[in-house]
Image (tube, grey):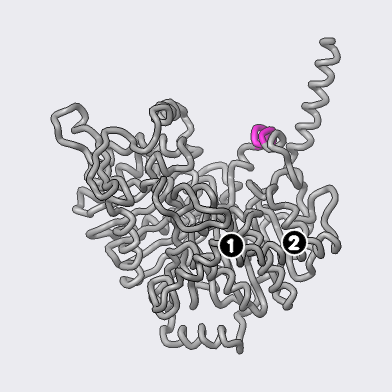
Amino acid sequence: MRYLITMTGLALLTLALAACSPPAPVVKQPSKALPPTQGTPAARYVHAEADQHQGESGFRLLMRSTNALMSRVSLADHAKHSLDLQYYIFDNDATGRLMAQRLLAAADRGVRVRLLVDDINASKSIDLFDALDTHPNIEVRLFNPFATKKPSLLSKAAQFMLDMHRLNRRMHNKSFIADANVAIIGGRNIGDAYFDAGENTNFRDLDLIAIGPVVQQAEHAFDEYWNCAAAYPVKAFAGKHADHYDLAKLRVELAHDARKFAQSDYAQATLSELPNGPSADRPGKWFWGPATLVADQPAKIEASSDQPELRIGPDIKAMTDATQHELLLISPYFIPGDRGTAYLDALAQRGVTIKVLTNSLASDDEPIVYAGYSRYRRPLLEHGVQLYELQPATGAPQPPTVGGTSSGVSLHAKAIVVDRQKVFIGSMNMDARSKLLNTEMGIIVDSPALAEAVTTFFDTATQPQYAYHVTLKADGSAHGGTMQWQATEHGKPVTYDHDPGVTTTRRVEVQMLKLLPVESLL
């Protein structure tokens, strides 16, 4: 019996090791971004606008999640020559399938579609990607993939254990580029939760629609990732792949899903929400200014130690170093570490007002990340940093979703505003994972008007009915005062002396998670 158990164990280990071998290098056809489209009504409009602002780029701020979805759909529907998409997550849900249907329709019109998706969650959508890739005008690649096309949860766990240095590094970038003329860059992935269509928690996020010179910078960054060694064609993996029959079947299914989506309460609510006049995130108003797209190099995932020249951190630091009066930080995962806390303290000592919006324990979808943040909360408050934590809004009226209504919200936006003059919006969280492990991207814009719009977003989100204001009560207690959370509930001010909106069990869980030495991985 022991012999049988031993031999069975060895056989399973052999299979696991085989499954955990990194994918073999593949020969793939390199490709580059197509030149900006000329001559179409959309292209003429973009070029006419840009000609009035030589050397500057124009932006619209996408605050409403429904506008963010419809903007992507519109770009796909009006594309004439190329669509380049790069995402950390592309879910096989209602909005993901709607986007897939619009990409397929674009490909049918002759548009070249390149879709690059990180492989961490791609197994949920792999059959969708495989079928789309069968179309002659669509190519799908997976970034830093697992060894097999569709690994089981057990296989993923085994591969992580044996190849953690590689698989723990993910492509967190998010971009959508149409005809090399228009780009959407920001924090949203493709999936119901990012467009207020999720039945559970939905994310509050920010994107920028961009035109002008910065779009060519975005195309260059996309090409670097698309052609790097870590990007694998979806057809490169062993096993059965989709054929033209599967594509035809998918085409019918996606058309049916699109009709169903159009009849949903969510779609009707989206149409009714469209404002009659221009606003910060609707047609009629562009924010213009010098802009730079910043993106980590793909080689960052291969680095065995920190190499600042491969990442965007130095660009962000140069921006915040210049702060004279006010620094606004928006990050769902905010773990400044000792160095970051000291850095913010130094800014505060110079007289800079620092305000931070992050998730509360009740709104955070990653309690272990909140545990990391909570270590630095008191020191930050003692240094004069103003902290705001988003309320989950559980029980409050939420927008209709594809399947009903959602149960709450969570912060997912990543933004920085310096002196109401410069803005960063992108994919980068303010934590060690974004700094050292994942690849990130974003846009730095010098525009007081755009900065004011993002500041308005911050000021609204930190109102007491939407966020907890975390403060220290000067009561003579140890460590400078008792921590308290102030907010407004049902129109009345309330104060808590512990993380509100969660059970005692969850608070105890966070205290236990704080003991784990995993901050460098968060």
Q: Nearer the viewer, residue 383 or 81?
A: 81
* Secondary structure state at the residue bearing disc 2: helix
Per the image, the residue denoted by label 1 is 264
Residue 509, can we see it?
Answer: yes
Position of residue 338 measured from the top left corner of the image (x, y, whole percent)? 35, 38
Q: Residue at x 43, y 61 (%)?
A: 425
Task: Residue type at mark 1: give it.
Answer: Ser
Position of residue 308 measured from the top left corner of the image (x, y, whole percent)? 47, 51
Residue 461 to residue 2: above or below: below
Horizontal side, residue 489 vs residue 445: left or right = left
Horizontal side, residue 221 vs residue 416: left or right = right
Task: Residue type at mark 2: give it.
Answer: Glu
Q: Which residue is drawn at 70% across and 72% down?
A: 105
Position of residue 276 measured from the top left corner of the image (x, y, whole percent)? 41, 78
The reply to whether the magenta stretch includes residue 451 is: no
Residue 387, can we see it?
Answer: no
For residue 413, what is the image quadrant? bottom left
Q: Which residue is drawn at 66% across and 54% down?
A: 92
The chief SS type of the magenta part is helix
Nearer-N-terminus badge (2/1): 2
Q: Nearer the viewer, residue 363 or 325?
A: 363
Q: Nearer the viewer, residue 343 or 99?
A: 99
Per the image, the residue denoted by label 2 is 253
For residue 216, what is the image quadrant? bottom right
For residue 415, what is the image quadrant? bottom left
Q: What stretch is highlighted in magenta?
A: 157-163
Nearer to us: label 2 or label 1: 1
The reply to whether the magenta stretch includes residue 159 is: yes
Q: How crowded is mark 2: few (under 14 residues within 10 Å), some or many (20 or more)?
A: few
